[in-house]
Image (spheres, rainbow, N blue to C red):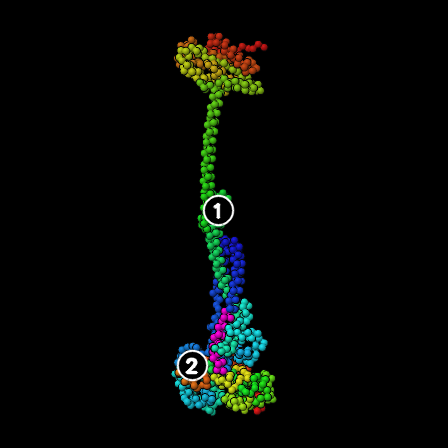
Amino acid sequence: MTRLHRDVVLLCAACVIAASAASCSRRDDALAAFEGGFDPTRYDAGPVTPVDASKLGRALIFAVPPFYAEKIADGAAHDLATYLEHETGVAVEVKASSAYDYNAIVDSLVRGDVDIAELSPLQYALADEHGIGIVPLAASVANGASTYGSYLVAGRGADIHDVRDIKGKRVAFVDPLSTSGFLLPALFLQQHGFDLDKDIHAQFAGSHPAALALVKDGTVDVAAVSSDLLIGNAGLGGPLVVVAKAGRAPNDVIVARKGLDNQIQSVVRTALFRLSIHDVNGRSALRAFSSVDGFMPVPAGHYDAVRVLAKKMPALASPKQ
Amino acid sequence: LILIVTLGLGVSLAASMGVLVRIEETEERKDEVDRAASLLSALSAPMSVLLTQGRVADIDNLMGELEHRRQNLGLDAIVLVDAHGVVIAGTDETWFNKDLAATDPFVQRAIAATRALEDPEPPLAPRRVSVPVQSGVRWATLIGSLDEKKLQSNLTERRRRLLVSAFAVSSVGLLVLLLLLSIEVLTPLSDIVRMAALLAKGDLKARAQVRGSSELQVLASTLNDAARRLGQTQETLEAEVARRTDELRHTNEKLTDANERLEKLALTDPLTGLFNRRYLEQALAFEVTRQKRTKRPFSLLMVDVDHFKHYNDAHGHPKGDEILRQLGRILQSTLRASDIVARIGGEEFVVVLLDAELPLAKTAAEKVRQAVEQFEFSEASDQPLGRMTISVGVASWPKHGESADDVVAAADRALYLSKAAGRNRATSAPEPLS
């Protein structure tokens, strides 16, 4: 072999290596990672494989919070059950009783009386902290978003424009366990140097609409409420003004109890992803949930902020009323 | 050559890569800015609707979703500021109610501008863009900060892909170039070099393959032609040399023959083939010297054909010549091989008897005379003596003289005595007077 031939062979080898390197170089398409958007119907959940309903031995029990009891009575529960039965091939019973509350639903999940349930993010975070093994199936999308905010609102004429202006004022919260109605605004005020016992006159209104009503009728100067309450409302230019935004929390989550058959979990998850207010069946089934537009896969870290909040809860002891 | 080509390509590639990377950076940044401006413009329509209706919660929901997806948007943060530059909403809610215009000149310019702005202005690399939110009425302004980390990561990725592809493409290009170079230039050239080396060693049958670029083909053809002609010339030359050598040898041979013949002609008598007078004189001079040195004697017979004129007249010269030839043969056959027999003119012969003193010479002379007398010459019966005879004069050295001439003269005188005494006899020269 002459020097020339050896050189050519070596160069050939170098080129082959270079070409291999080039072919291995693939661009990670940023768009491929773009999951989600503003329309839950974009999720392609894939085909539903019929499951063996006999594995369960009874109807699948789906519990929704008591907040929706009236709508269930209206037949929303029936519509949701019918939709799920049709999609999954499993008999479904949607339960919503005024006797149930979040804690009661968590207990039922632990006991196995309930298979699927809607939980608030805080409830889910607390339950998950206790290691009861509940599985998040789908995150709800409401009012076009997967999160909602906590507002501190005041009457337009109250001359309260800034968080500093709240000092010494009467503040209505919703409930000591309410994420947007107490935990987020309380933490926000603390972070702005407020002593909840001394710097404000706090009270719990019991519900978001009640808290809002208190600020409207002038009983309190400021109310801490969920932003959902102001959706479509004239927050700007109306009788109320948003003084501060105390942070955002994820919407409710649909969970499955520990040990529920994986295939059943899968078909229920798929059926939920297919729900959308963009079609008639979806709209009728979604009446069982408050303001929910649809469901989406649970994003990684979606509940991390709430988990942090849950850990800080002991520091947010209820203020003196 | 390969090294030079490779280095040259490498340098030009590096230079063009530098320019390309710079262009790519500018393009990527421009793309990002355009994308951000497009996104903000797209957002401005729903924002203006929501602002019209005072739906701050809906705006926050939208911002909340944008915040969740900002990694995919190419924007690090988005804020919506009102006509005074105060934040209405943003991907970071903590900015709510902040008066950005008070501290940020760009926000001041953005709220005043009726078109999209970039900060800083081109040609500097922009980091922020602003888009007015208006539907008839100017409602607010959207400001987005580019996701510099994502931009840099995109740039790095672009550079990597550019480098890898450039390396791959240039490697393949280089390979093709080298292959072409090898096929078109290097291999034919090395072939020509090899052929030239063989030629230099004298192998005129060496030939280069005619291939590669046209110039090299011409070179190879020319060299091959030159080698062929050189070969032919050499063959012709060798053949010519061989022919000339042959001719020379032939000429030499002829010359030698001619010389021999010439020599022979010069020293012999053409009629009888016996030595002539010149040879005799040379031989006598030589012999006298030699005999003097060795102190050995020699004798001389002077022979003359009796009445030869008579025979010639009667029978003609050809017959006379025949008699002379015959007489030569008799003299040669009768005498010793070492004796020198010469015809010195007409019918006169001289015989030099080496190492012979007078008595032996007299005997030899008699022997010769008798041999002639007894030989039956053609048509010699009408000679005056009834047959062909000879008269002989004998003389010896050093008895009859110190020099050859003396001895010859003595022999000649003795011959005269034989003639005078009636011919057909051999007479010794008289003793010289002391």
Image-quadrant location for residue B235: top left
Subunit that carries the residue with mark 2 = A
Three-letter code, disc 2: Ser
Mark 1, residue position: B195
Label 2: how many Cα within 10 Å (few below 14, some 14–19, many 20+): many
Q: Is residue B11 above or below residue B148?
A: above
Image-quadrant location for residue A73: bottom left
Pair 2/1: label in front: 2
Mark 2, residue position: A276
In contact (CB < 8 Å): disc 2 and disc 1 = no
Q: Is residue B306 above or below residue B82?
A: above
Residue A218 location in percent, x, y?
54, 90
Q: Is B50 contained in the magenta span?
A: yes
Report the residue that reaches farthest toward the top. B421
Q: Residue at x 55, y 13 (%)?
A: B406
Residue B320 as seen in the image, left or right of residue B1: left
Q: Is A90 contained in the magenta span?
A: no
Residue B409 location in percent, x, y?
53, 12
